[in-house]
Image (tube, rainbow, N blue to C red):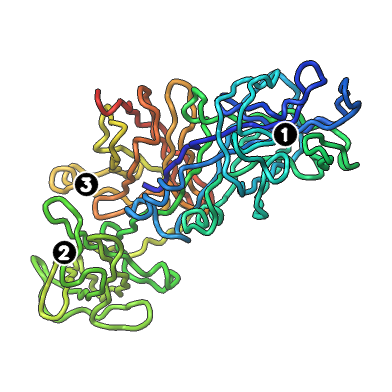
């Protein structure tokens, strides 16, 4: 699992806009229970009470940082620096004027505030806190429109209807560490686009001669929205791949760069179905030697490459509870070994002995197409919302033509695709609910082990009661592009109690 979402636990729109009579400002209005959030700047509004003036709207939002911190403590989320946190807000379509070519900024809020229960986003008649002037029934903002920290993020909206997606990892890490108090974030137009200054009364906004145009109105879905995938979230993304090369171990070659000659091998210490550390090793290191043999390791240990020097062993290091790994390169002999045994040990104690079948790097006389046929071998018809499922793939070349002897006498071994990614879509409307994570976070990359490619999926990310499809994409170096594979693998997500 390399993706987790945390839905906002409070949000509100605050404004100083005029009510429908164009005389009274809605500075005391509250929209905490509305199913949309709104940002706008209206320049030169003609009111009955003060002539031409400015109207503004901003968004307040808070997220459950305590849950994020608990997940890190539990090991669900990796340590700081190994995970990215993205603020994601989804555009809400509406029949009103939509601004174009504007920028929204995001700042941490520096004062505690109350969400409130208002709904009226038209006449601003639901009074309550928080609002443009007050944080709660007993406190006011230091400055009208909210108190904000100096840390700032921004996103430009060329067309206006785009969703917001901003990396706020630095801010979230400060919330987790307690460096910043978690009062949430504020979303607003830039100072030049708002183009205002507070008058002495504190509630009236006067134009300061900045951008003399209006930006109205940009709306996002709120946390109370009926649309499961449109609610505002902080999305944690990280690379959780296990790149175990036991199923695709290659001999080193002068044709390959040094880094590509290294192979990763893993040891999984399952005790009664649970991954636990080896008591005498804990989170420390031990060693791995490699041997030839037909039914078991025999003779002297092979000479291998550790990445820095030739040796008769490599060091295995701790990865996570119960999992250890090592990295090694082995050069083929004049007659390459068909099977190699790896022995994991410390001192005179052997903890684990396994084997793998090394291959030699293939060379080509023309650019290959790499067309594959894929199947998910353990796909079920339905999954529960409270489970994390593991999907295992069988992959073979599309043009593979085994002989009758091969089919009758050999177990067909899956191919391993080094760069593979998955996405999830909802079948009823083709809504992509988990995008291909092939960027810097690699959050939807597939893992590998001796059985081939696989990935884990947290079903709580998906709304219950719907059918979903899995799509797969493999990177094709021959054309320098990702290639989506034909077909999809479908399943339903049900409530855990059904």
Q: Position of residue 480 (x, y in %)?
A: 54, 52
Q: Position of residue 270 (x, y in %)?
A: 16, 56
Of 282 and 64, nearer the camera is: 64
Crowding near pointer 1: few (<14 within 10 Å), some, many (20+)?
Answer: few
Relative placement, left or right, of 348 versus 433 is left
Q: Spatial distance from mark 3 to mark 1, Cα to Cα?
A: 52 Å
In the picture of the structure, the residue carrying the numbered disc 1 is 159
Please report whichever mark, 3 or 2, sits nearer to the chain's N-terminal start: 2
Please report whichever mark, 1 or 2, sits nearer to the chain's N-terminal start: 1
- Please say if 220 is above or below 308: above
Of 352 and 118, nearer the camera is: 118
Q: Position of residue 162 (x, y in %)?
A: 65, 34
* Viewer can see residue 370: no
Crowding near pointer 3: few (<14 within 10 Å), some, many (20+)?
Answer: few
Q: Spatial distance from mark 3 to mark 2, Cα to Cα?
A: 20 Å
In the picture of the structure, the residue carrying the numbered disc 3 is 412
Q: Quadrant of the C terminus?
A: top left
Question: Quadrant location of residue 209?
Answer: top right
Q: Residue furthest left?
A: 295
Residue drawn at the location 52% of the way across and 25% of the way down: 225
* Viewer can see residue 496: yes
- Please say if 344 is above or below 2: below
Of 93 and 324, nearer the camera is: 93
Q: Nearer the viewer, mark 3 or mark 1?
A: 1
Tag shown at residue 354: 2
Label 2 near label 1: C-beta < 8 Å?
Answer: no
Residue drawn at the location 78% of the way across and 33% of the way down: 41
């Amino acid at each position: 699992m390399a993706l987790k979402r945390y839905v906002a636990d409070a949000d509100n729109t605050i404004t100083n806009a005029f009510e429908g009579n164009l005389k009274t400002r809605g500075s005391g209005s509250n929209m905490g229970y509305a199913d949309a959030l709104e940002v706008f700047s209206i320049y030169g509004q003609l009111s009955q009470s003060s002539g031409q003036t400015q109207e503004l709207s901003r968004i307040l939002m808070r997220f459950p940082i305590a849950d994020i911190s608990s997940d890190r403590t539990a090991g669900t989320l990796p340590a700081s620096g190994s995970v990215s946190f993205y603020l994601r807000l989804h555009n809400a379509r509406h029949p009103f004027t939509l601004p174009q070519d504007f920028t929204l900024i995001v700042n941490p809020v520096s004062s505690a505030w109350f969400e409130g229960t208002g709904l009226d986003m038209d006449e601003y008649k639901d009074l309550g806190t928080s609002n443009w002037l007050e944080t709660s029934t007993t406190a006011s903002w230091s400055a009208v429109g909210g108190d904000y920290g100096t840390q700032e993020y921004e996103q430009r909206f060329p067309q206006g209807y785009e969703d917001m997606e901003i990396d706020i990892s630095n801010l979230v890490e400060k919330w987790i560490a307690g460096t910043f108090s978690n009062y949430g974030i504020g979303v607003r137009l830039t100072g030049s686009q708002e183009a205002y200054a507070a008058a002495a009364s504190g509630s009236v906004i006067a134009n300061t001669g900045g951008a003399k145009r209006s930006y109205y109105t940009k709306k996002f879905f709120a946390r109370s929205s009926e649309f499961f995938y449109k609610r505002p979230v902080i999305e944690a993304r990280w690379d959780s791949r296990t790149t175990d090369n036991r199923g695709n171990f290659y001999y080193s070659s002068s044709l390959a760069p040094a880094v590509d000659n290294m192979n990763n091998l893993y040891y999984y210490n399952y005790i009664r179905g649970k991954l636990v550390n080896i008591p005498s090793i804990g989170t420390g290191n031990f060693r791995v030697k490699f041997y030839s043999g037909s039914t078991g390791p025999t003779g002297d240990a092979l000479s291998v490459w550790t990445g820095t020097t030739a040796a008769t062993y490599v060091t295995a290091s701790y990865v996570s509870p119960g999992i250890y790994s090592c990295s090694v390169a082995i050069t083929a002999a004049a007659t390459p070994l068909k099977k190699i045994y790896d022995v994991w040990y410390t001192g005179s104690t052997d903890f684990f002995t396994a084997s793998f079948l090394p291959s030699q790097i293939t060379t080509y006389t023309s650019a290959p197409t790499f067309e594959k046929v894929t199947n998910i071998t353990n796909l079920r018809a339905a999954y529960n919302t409270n489970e994390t499922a593991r999907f295992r793939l069988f992959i073979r070349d599309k043009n593979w033509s085994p002989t009758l002897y091969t089919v009758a006498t050999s177990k067909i071994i899956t191919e391993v695709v080094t760069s593979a990614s998955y996405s999830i879509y909802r079948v009823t409307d083709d809504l992509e609910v988990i995008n291909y994570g092939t960027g810097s976070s690699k959050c939807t990359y597939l893992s590998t082990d001796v059985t081939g490619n696989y990935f884990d999926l947290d079903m709580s990310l998906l709304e219950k009661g719907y059918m979903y499809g899995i799509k797969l994409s493999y990177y094709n170096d021959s054309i320098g592009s990702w290639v989506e594979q034909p077909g999809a693998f479908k399943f339903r997500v049900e409530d855990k109690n059904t």
